Amino acid sequence: MENIGSLLSRHATVLANDFVLLTIAGFIRFISQETNTLVIELDSPLELEGRRYSWVVASPRLERDSLDTLLSLKSLSCGVTWVPDERFNRDVPFDVSWWRGGAAAITDIVID
């Protein structure tokens, strides 16, 4: 089986969902095995309601799943939060402690 680190720089697709009615894609730029979380940098930023979103933070929805599941099945149901550009910090890329609603959904992440 592949190493979780092999997810870095892989192309990933976020399927249409309750927040974004279209499929969007980008590259996995950050991975945390400790928190079972990854960050995708979108190929094309999403512009909604005057905000620009270039980053998506995702973690498996089900407790039984992990980033290993994504590697083996190439698809994973995740809780996803879109991070506005002004909130994203490369030093703490997984931080969504500021989040209080909106810009989030349950959806599938698919890797090529």
Image (cartoon, rainbow, N blue to C red):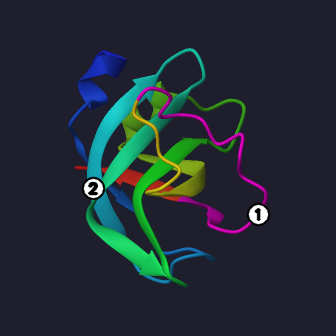
Q: Which residues are magenta?
A: 91-107
Q: Quadrant of the N terminus?
A: top left
Q: Is residue 10 visible?
A: yes
Q: Is residue 23 visible?
A: no
Say which residue label 1 marks: 101
Above or below residue 8? Residue 75 is: below
Q: Is residue 99 magenta?
A: yes
Above or below residue 40? Residue 67 is: above
Provide the secondary structure element on which disc 1 rests: loop
Q: Is residue 78 left or right of residue 22?
A: right
Q: Where residue 11 sits in the image (x, y, percent)?
A: 22, 48
Circle 1 packing at 10 Å, graded few (<14), some (14-19), many (20+), is: few
Mark 2–mark 1 distance (CA, rounded to whole Å) = 23 Å
Q: Where residue 23 sits in the image (x, y, percent)?
A: 38, 74
Front-lying residue, 70 or 54: 54
Say which residue label 2 marks: 26
